[in-house]
Amino acid sequence: MSHQAHRSEETQEPETPHLDFQGTTPYEDYVKADVLTHLQQPLSDDPGEMVFLVTTQVMELWFTVIVHEWETAARALREDRVPMAIDALKRSVRELHALNESWRPLAHLTPAQFNSYRSALGEGSGFQSAMYRRMEFLLGEKSASMLVPHRGAPRVHAELEKALHEPSLYDEVLRLLARRGHAVPASVLNREVSLRYEPSAQVEAVWTALYSGDPTDELARMGEVLTDVAELVWRWRNDHLVATRRAMGAKAGTGGSAGVAWLEKRAQKNVFPELWTARSHV
């Protein structure tokens, strides 16, 4: 091809992308950006409320995708598809990092800044988040009482009630370990899954044996990914605690919660507890 012909082809290339669409753009049809960017309705005149509102909404979106990943992992474990479960858990680790970074815009709120729009929250509080509750249920933190705030929203209540009575992600992990020949006790395998998971010395022994063996074993690698998840959930809870301490000290929280006292209690709990305690015995 001659240099002149090459230049001629270059001049015929469009300088701008296709701009004329019938109706909305394909991007809008897929992302629903116009819906997302018009969901913000601040209730005060304080300009700082906007970042609080948007950050909270972003957190809800991350909760949604993380629930999707953990439900995908739980389903894969039920089907003995461990690589698929590990892939979903690894994606959720990256998403948890992004979720935890969501605290950054709110991490240095002073009491005066928070008080300038706190009244707009009314009785609203983060513990009322249905999607976050589904995350907690998947982690084994079950509590029927946490359905009560959602009685007025039938669809949300039904989804939470379903999640309450389904095995948690960790329940599916332990059932898989039992199917692979590990000595998970019947009392754990047959437990009432709508109740909070309680640590088991026998389960601790199973993880101790796995961690004392081949570190490249599929189940040991799954344990490490689960530990990554647990660590990031712990960091999420602690970042929440620190941000709340900075913004409001030890005052009672919105929505009638105990504020910092409630968050301190949550931050002390280990997710997938035997994965942590087994390390002392390896």
Image (cartoon, rainbow, N blue to C red):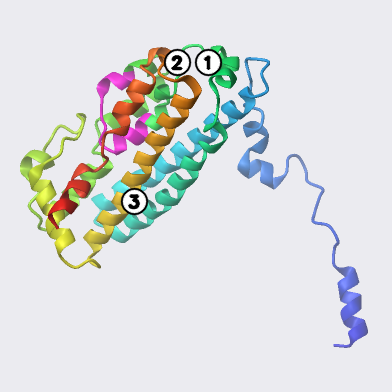
First in residue order: circle 3 vs circle 1: 1
Q: Residue 137: say if magenta.
A: yes
Seen in the picture, residue 54 relative to 117 is either above or below; the reply is below
**In the image, what residue type sits under mark 2?**
Thr
Q: Are marks 2 and 1 in contact (CB under 8 Å)?
A: yes
Asked which secondary structure carries label 2, the reply is helix
Q: Nearer the viewer, residue 145 or 269?
A: 269
Q: Mark 1 = which residue? A: 121
Dot 3: element: helix
Q: Are marks 3 and 1 in contact (CB under 8 Å)?
A: no
Give percent across and percent down for residue 215.
Answer: 23, 66
Amino acid type at mark 1: Leu
Answer yes or no: is residue 119 visible: yes
Q: Is residue 81 in sight in this rendering?
A: no
**Which residue bears the numbered disc 3?**
228
Q: Position of residue 105 (x, y in %)?
A: 57, 35
Residue 58 in picture, x, y percent from top left: 54, 35
Give the side of residue 281 with respect to residue 8, left or right: left
Please state the extent of the stretch shown in magenta in the rendering: 133-147
Q: Which residue is mark 2?
A: 254
Q: Could you say whether the residue bearing mark 1 is in a helix, strand or loop?
A: helix
Check disc 1: other Cα within 10 Å, few if <14, some if 14-19, many if 20+.
some
Pick out the residue farthest to the bottom. Answer: 2
Query: Along the line of sight, which residue is nearer the eye, 266 or 66?
Result: 266
- In the rendered view, does 89 fall on the left or right side of 23? left
Image quarter for residue 223? bottom left
Query: Considering the image in quadrants, where does the N terminus appear?
Result: bottom right
Residue 121 part of the magenta segment = no
Give the quarter of the image for residue 266: top left
Question: Which quarter of the picture shows residue 83?
Answer: bottom left
